[in-house]
Amino acid sequence: MTDDCATAGDPGSRSATIRTEVDDAAVLAGSVRPDNTSEIDTRVERDDGRSAVVTTIERDTTGGLRTTVDDYVVNLAVAQEVVQIANRHADTQTNTTHDK
């Protein structure tokens, strides 16, 4: 997983865009999207065959942005771990089924 964070925008607001390249980008984006508020946009982007979860967060204050980015990164890490465990379990079940 690679994360890139950039800040930009109107002097009255703060924003950060976090791009995370992962194998299961659509699943991960779907996992974290329910936590989005009107200030958070999560999408999947594809570039040169690689998929990435891209999330843009806008907040009025630097402290609010930092807190929201921190929460998002933790949620994304947990979602990625759950997806990896589920994939390992699915692989185990597929191998067991084919062995019978």
Image (cartoon, rainbow, N blue to C red):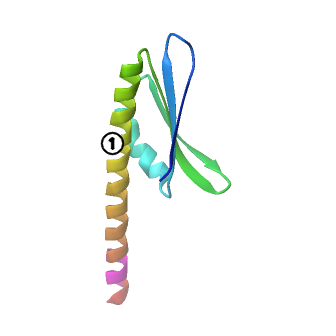
Residue 23: x percent and y percent? 50, 58
Q: Residue furthest top?
A: 12
User: Principal SS element in the magenta part?
Assistant: helix
Is residue 63 shown above or below 73? above
Q: Secondary structure at mark 1?
A: helix
Q: Residue furthest bottom?
A: 100
Is residue 7 shown above or below 2? above
Q: Quadrant of residue 87?
A: bottom left
User: Residue drawn at (62%, 49%), measured in percent from left and top?
Assistant: 46
Left or right, residue 81 beside residue 55? left
Residue 33: x percent and y percent? 41, 37
Residue 94 magenta: yes
Q: Quadrant of residue 86?
A: bottom left
Nearest the viewer among 49 and 18 is: 18
Q: Which residue is the site of mark 1?
A: 74
Residue type marked 1: Val
Is residue 71 shown above or below 3? above
Q: Give the extent of the magenta segment.
A: 93-97
Number of numbered tags placed on the structure image: 1
Q: Classify mark 1: residues with Cα within 10 Å, few (<14), some (14-19) or many (20+).
A: few
